[in-house]
Image: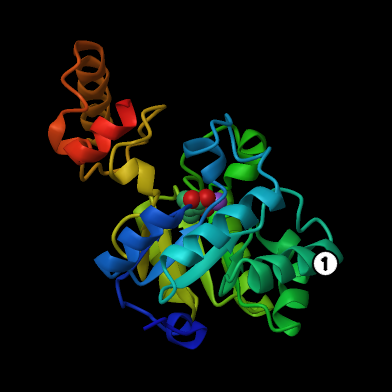
Amino acid sequence: MRRTVQEFRKAKGARLVYVTAYDYPTARLAEEAGVDAILVGDSLGMVVLGYESTVPVTLEEVLHHTKAARRGAPNTFLVADLPYLSYATLDRALQAAERLLKEGGADAVKLEGGKEVAEVVRGLTRAGVPVMGHVGLTPQTASALGGYRVQGKDLDSARRILEDALALEEAGVYGLVLELVPTPLARLVTERVSVHTVGIGAGPFTDAQVLVFHDLVGLFEGFKPRFVKRYLEAAPLFRQALARYAEEVRSGAFPDEAHSFGMEEEVLKRLYG
Ligand code: KIV
Ligand code: NA
């Protein structure tokens, strides 16, 4: 059955499993596999829409994929990403969250940033919207962080991430993604905040883990960050299947009788006249 926000909030040390899914079949597979939560991440822009970053992703796109994922996983807790600039003001954030929750069927929304988004987080949570935070490497503003690199390695930036995490907790997030930070920092943040942390490239001590579906099954071949573990090499299998299909169509081996439909002799005779 679908978990509740309350269960996640206090899931310290629970080793919960999040995975991204953006459509009906993958959400369905995730639900069948028994994951604790699905994230309709704006990573969908890169792994299913072919954008070079998450920046161009629109609310309409996240909404479209959220609806599909929800249909595939009616009984799984589902978090939808607020895309870049859709939470630049509290007003915009409320409108975006309203659509993702009411039309999309999401249970919660996630947004990126620290202290600078605390007021928006507070406004959303006051309005009753479950909000997940996201600190460390924040892909929507990655270029300002110097690209996709580990965050919080020096004292100043590590302190900032810890302070951001505490500010988000205070503002009411029910959970917090820690992306691409050193393991000891993720451990410290996890110890210091009362809400559950969800790590990606953050080591084993967070309260939950998340991976991008297309990364873990090997369907996204653009690049493979070190924190990604591929549990399957799906792309070569898909390529082989497509090549065999093409070959069989061209050779006439497909469709054969087993994949075609006959007709009664008598009907056929009369049809020919
Ligand atoms: O968009 C996404 O998939 C994410 C996760 C990597 C946390 O934000
Ligand atoms: Na995201």
Task: Indicate whether 152 appears above or below 162.
Answer: above
User: Which residue sits at x=40%, y=59%?
Assistant: 27
Mark 1, residue position: 90
User: Which residue sits at x=20%, y=24%?
Assistant: 254
Amino acid of disc 1: Leu
Q: Quick check: can you spot residue 263? A: no
Q: Compare residues 188 and 203 and report the one nearer the observer.
A: 203
Relative to 128, is 21 on the left or the right? left
Q: Compare residues 52 and 240 and report the one nearer the observer.
A: 240
Q: Looking at the rendering, in which quadrant would you find the C terminus? A: top left
Q: Please provide percent x and percent y for residue 50.
A: 54, 31
Counting the numbered discs, the total is: 1
Q: Compare residues 63 and 128 and report the one nearer the observer.
A: 63
Q: Please provide percent x and percent y for residue 195.
A: 49, 78
Q: Quick check: can you spot residue 90? A: yes
Q: Quadrant of residue 131?
A: bottom right
Q: Please provide percent x and percent y for residue 18.
A: 38, 63
Q: Quadrant of residue 171?
A: bottom right
User: Which residue sits at x=58%, y=31%?
Assistant: 51
Q: Please provide percent x and percent y for residue 113.
A: 65, 56
Q: Residues within 10 Å of mark 1 (few under 14, many from 20)?
A: some
Task: Indicate whether 68 appears above or below 36.
Answer: above
